[in-house]
Amino acid sequence: MKRVTTIERFLLWVDDRVGTAHFLHHALRKAFPDHWSFMLGEINLYAFVILLATGTFLALFFDPNTAKTIYDGPYQLLDGTPVSHAYRSVMALSFEVNVGLLMRQIHHWTALLFVAGIAVHMGRIFFTGAFRKPREINWIIGFLLFWLAMFEGFTGYSLPDDLLSGIGLRIAVSVLQSVPILGTWLTFLLIGGVFPTKVLLGRLFVLHIYVVPFTLAGLIALHLMVLWRQKHSQFPGLGRTEHNVIGSPLFPRYAAKSLALFMAVIAVVSVLGALVQINPIWVWGPYDPWKAVSPAQPDWYIGWLEGALRLGPPLAVHLFGRMIPSLFWPAVLFPFLLFAVFLIWPWIDAAIRKDRATHHLLDNPRDVPWRTGFGVAMVIFAFGLVAAGGDDVQAKYLHVNVLSLVTFYRVFCIVGPVLGFFVAHQVARELRERHGVGKAPRVRLRRNAKGGFEEEPLP
Amino acid sequence: MMKRDGIIASALLLAILGSAAFIAAYFTGGDRLYEGLGIAAAAVGLCIAAAGWAFWIVPEEKVVDEVDTYPSSLDDRATQSGEVSEGLRELTRSRALVALLVAALGSFAAALILPIRSLGLAPDALLFRTRWRRGARIVRDDGTLVHVDDLNVDTVMTVFPEGATGDPQSVVTLVRVPESIPGTASGYVAYSRLCTHAGCPVALYRAQERELICPCHQSVFDVLADGAVISGPADHALPRLPIEIGSDGILRATDDFSEPVGPGFWERG
């Protein structure tokens, strides 16, 4: 007689009450395509899990109070310095709580990885046309996740109330204030008055540990549900059609692979957290509104915005006794346009292709040169902006004038993407012609005397 | 086979050792380095073991899923459309009631949104005025008064109005240039420290060129030309604080700034 294991018995117990066997036996055999690029999204899922775990630990110690206290902790260099309770609590986490600093560093490194992973995953989706019908919904959800992740990262590194984070917040509030008509109202409602306010960190804390993570978790769940329902897309290949998905079964093979990936992500961020110092707030010191550090750079994923701010033209508009500050163009309007274009990209793409059909087989990037060209142009553009966000550092080490660098990056951000588009477009076209089905050498197969086959080229 | 099992077994042993190392590090001073590397070693071990299971132990196998879950059958789609339109027809039989319903839902939404108003003050005079007044004496961040002899030529100091030390809107950079330069108070000039671009403190002073520089986005302001923008993304001059030297040699303001300090905004004009 077949032995019934405890797990089986448990699942039967559940099935008796909820009737899950039908769903589960299909779910366990669900096909997961084996191409490595399909695991990019999973990295972000696991990064999110790590962020929740480490973040919960940190939240148990953090104090968003902005009132001042005198630092009297073990870090001698700040002894007797007035610091906020918020800064004090992060200093305590860093120097007095066992594994506190490790948790902080893993949390911060994972946040950087999270946004980077989303960007790369989006790149995969973009370049292979995986956003085409029926996957427009998941493109939009994923895109919102990307922006929320950046916002979540920003609210996170603004919390410790150190000099660098304070300056970042100051800039963010100025950006909000630059919005025409609503700017000052939005600012006063969000932070409760003129920057810096007492309620600011408390509100950011609520956003960072409750509102944004909850939204992220909800959208991630929705993202996965839609993915589950629609099933995976796949690259064209032997036996793969628009009506099937071929891959490893979820259980046991893919589950084991995925677990390996989860462990790999933990390994990477804990090595970084152990070995590579990140955001040493004791070096920056506490925030005082009249102090500054130079050079100052934000986390990498805010770099494009920082670069846009540095390259933006001094172009204030004064009309009818009102003002649109020059900050508005690079910091509000430009991101908004970028946001809008990518949000509706599936429809722009479909309009260019003149194609409303459902697609489950992915494009090879070389097969759609204009899309690949546009993607490459945007990557170069983003790279230029991020690099421009560090122009003061480059000026210092390369011994060049910051102004020449600004001019250089202004030119680069226009010429670079255009050049990138044409180069990528041409390379893709040539690759397509070399490998494309239509251009394959025409041959005739002939059975030879020994019973094998041989090719005979056709003109 | 034995060799592969051996690798997986060693990886699992590494995971156990890594966890043990973490626990040991935790109880012996909590060194971040050993704690982190302990976790990393455990994760590496588990990663190798799981990959080993996936690629060596579980037999390679392909499954084929049919994509047949959507769209639904024509029948279902037609029935759905029918149910929706039928339901809507019943709900909207009375035009007047529908109009009233929209009005009711709209006012309910307006009422529910109103609590947002409690989050902050209305934008007010705070944006236009600082704590500087006619006769306000100038103090350092520790509250001590600034005397005419206190600053050497081509040095700077962060100052506040007396009684408002640390006020972020009123913070001023006091610069001393040679007395021979006209339009200064014995060589003293004072500018708002808030950059007119994005509000960062304009914290750097280049004595040779007599320029104030914002470290955030490199806007450069001319100390000898009423704070005019020389270069960078800032779109208007740094507001200048009018000051004088009292008969007691103490520096004081003769008025508030003549324009709002800090970055631009809609109502600024």
Image (tube, coloured by chain):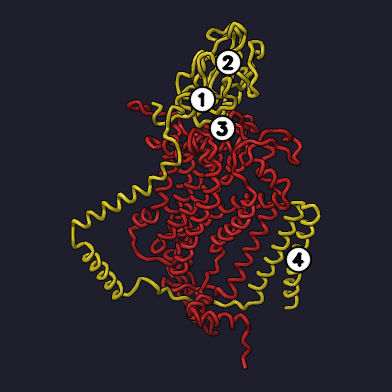
User: What chain does mark 4 sit on?
Assistant: B
Q: In the drawing, does residue A342 fall left or right of residue B3?
A: left
Assign a secondary structure to mark 3. Answer: loop
Mark nearer the viewer, 2 or 1: 2
Amino acid type at mark 1: Ser
**Which one is nearer the viewer's eye here, A148 or A311?**
A148
Which mark identifies residue B137?
A: 2
Label 1: element kind: strand
Both labels 4 and 1 in a single chain: yes
In primary-sequence order, the first of circles 3 and 2 is: 2
Disc 4 crowd, CA 10 A, few/some/many (<14, 14-19, 20+): many
Q: Quadrant location of residue A255? A: bottom right
Q: Is residue A198 above or below residue A205?
A: above
Pinpoint residue A281: horizontal percent, then vertical percent.
66, 40
Q: Does A214 sit above or below residue B248? A: below
- Residue at 40% in and 74% down: B68
> What amino acid does circle 4 point to?
Leu
- Mark 2 and mark 1 lie on one chain; the one further toward the N terminus is 2
Disc 2 marks a residue whose amino acid type is Arg
- Tell which subunit mark 2 falls on: B
Q: Quick check: marks 4 and 3 in contact, CB under 8 Å?
A: no
Q: CA distance from mark 4 to mark 1?
A: 58 Å
Hue used for the chain lettered B: yellow
> Gap in Å between the C-alphas at discs 2 and 1?
32 Å
Q: Which residue is mark 3?
A: B216
Q: Which residue is mark 4?
A: B14
Is label 4 in contact with label 1 (beta carbons under 8 Å)? no
